[in-house]
Image (cartoon, rainbow, N blue to C red):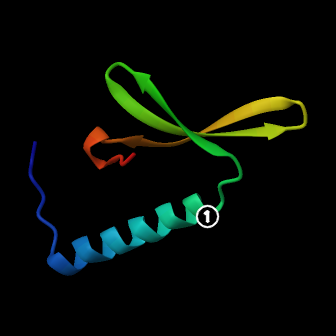
Amino acid sequence: MEIVAYSRPAVVAYQDLLRLHLGERASSLVGTIEERQRDGRTYLYERFGIGTEMMSRYLAKTNRSCVHA
């Protein structure tokens, strides 16, 4: 596998776009956040009600060291 090195401005631009994208997704939350464990990994889901049914929407895979109580 070839290792690709990106320029510093490219990395910073990517990080800024990712932060904005994740912030935009977080601002559209209508329910509550729940963690689900599967195969030793933690995933975040939004849980919300539509009519009489409860729905879940996948948000992200998380690193446990980054999740704060």
Q: Which quadrant of the figure contains the N terminus?
A: top left
Q: Is residue 52 left or right of residue 3?
A: right
Residue that badge 1 annotates:
27
* Foreground residue among 57 and 65: 65
Is residue 55 placed above or below 11 in the rendered structure?
Answer: above
Task: Please give the name of the residue rendered at 37% of the width and 42% of the height, measured from the top-left corner.
Answer: 62
Task: Please give the name of the residue rendered at 66% of the width and 60% of the height, measured from the top-left corner.
Answer: 28
Is residue 44 placed above or below 2 in the rendered structure?
Answer: above
The image quadrant of residue 24 is bottom right
Is residue 39 placed above or below 54 in the rendered structure?
Answer: above
Looking at the rendered structure, the kind of residue marked 1 is: Ser
Q: Is residue 30 left or right of residue 35?
A: right
Task: Please give the name of the residue rendered at 41% of the width and 67% of the height, measured from the top-left corner.
Answer: 19
| Count of residue discs | 1
Q: Find residue 26 and report its horizontal and vertical position in percent.
A: 56, 59
Q: Find residue 58 and report its horizontal and vertical position in percent.
A: 56, 39
